[in-house]
Amino acid sequence: MLLSIIIPLYNTEKYIVKCVESALNQDIPAEDYEIIVVNDGSTDNSKSLVEELAARHKNIVLINQHNSGIGTSRNTGLAHARGKYIQFLDSDDYLEPNTFGELLHIIEEEKLDILCLNFDRVTSEGAPLAKDPYLIQSEQNPTGRMQGRDFLLANHYVIMVYCYLLRRDFIDRHSLRMAPYLHEDEEFTPRALFLAKSIRYIPKVAYHYVDRDGSFVHTERFQKRIDLLKAMKSLSDFTADKVAPNDPEAAQYFTDKIHYFTHRVLHQSRMNRKEMLTLLSYCRETGLEPFSAPLSGKKKFLFRHCLPLFLTYCQSRNKF
């Protein structure tokens, strides 16, 4: 089988039919690809709608699991996937029709580990929205074949995992899986790009991201900040284990990114002292330092021994 399209599903009954139908409306034979829908404990009518579609289309596979989050759902899809290539698709988004025939030809012909796609933002009704900052950034990528490490360090890449068509044996060779918490893309994508031996960017919109008020990205909460710190801790471990020993330049890039996101999390919590102390406590316990440069002297002592005074010290100097 050539392709597995993996769709995590949770309570998107208004969007899931359009999503799955967009995966069906591709210019490749149905027997050459599968659409794996992982129902993550939906409580609305989403599951029934997919069951109706699966009854009419043999290449739709529905897997049910207890609610475990999008990262775990994607991992479940990977565990069942039979395709040579993997494409992730969120259940409230949709694919450009008759697109993957060309994309699969490119990734096969050039023997790429990863093919980077383009995307746009649309309303729930399909009306185009202003370009996403990530899209503006990604349009600066060169279109030729290159090493993933160089593609990463060029720093124009899109973080969202659905913008990448991935070779399955590349994923398995490096045991690449999603983190079981939020911000799984921020943790997964840099690792995958760094490890890829060959990657190419195609300036072609293949994915339509639906910007809806009820989607998760519109829901801010404290757990998201803790989970982003968890993602940065995982990247920090990856950097120390896989990057730093042989590639100081790339290690510095990862370190700068980790510090950027860590600082951003703390900055977002600067008006909530209790929340800030909890985040700082996590940083201390896991070894994440909250500044781009290593702590030293007075700050280092306060960070390790008295977080409330450390926070007071930082706030007095407007560091967050």
Image (tube, rainbow, N blue to C red):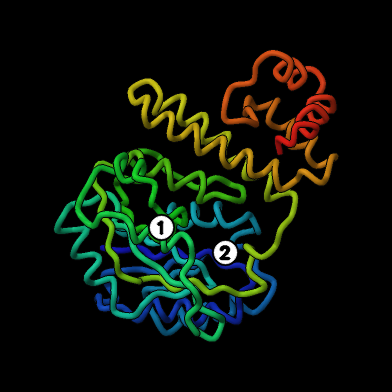
Task: Say what secondary structure mark 2 lies in.
Answer: strand
Q: Which dot marks residue 309?
A: none
Identify which amino acid the numbered label 2 is placed on. Asn
Work out whether mark 1 precedes mark 2 in sequence or the reverse, and give the earlier one.
2
> Mark 1 — residue?
137
In depth, the one of 77 and 87 nearer the eye is 87
Residue 131 % position (x, y)? 46, 70
In depth, the one of 229 and 66 nearer the eye is 229
> Mark 2 — residue?
64
Residue at far front of view: 317
**23 to 282, vertically: above or below:** below
Q: Is residue 45 left or right of residue 202?
A: right
- Nearer the observer: mark 1 or 2; the answer is 1
Q: Residue at x 47, y 46 (%)?
A: 188
**77 to 99, vertically: above or below:** above
Identify which amino acid the numbered label 1 is placed on. Gln
Q: Is residue 166 left or right of residue 105?
A: right
Instruction: Give the quarter of the figure containing the N terminus.
Output: bottom left
Q: Residue at x 40, y 70 (%)?
A: 207
The CA span between labels 1 and 2 is: 37 Å
Instruction: Give the quarter of the figure containing the C terminus.
Output: top right
Q: Residue at x 62, y 62 (%)?
A: 217
Please identify the quarter of the rendering in which residue 118 is found.
bottom left
Q: Residue at x 34, y 61 (%)?
A: 139
Residue 169 % position (x, y)? 29, 47
**45 to 287, vertically: above or below:** below
Decide if residue 170 is in sight here: yes
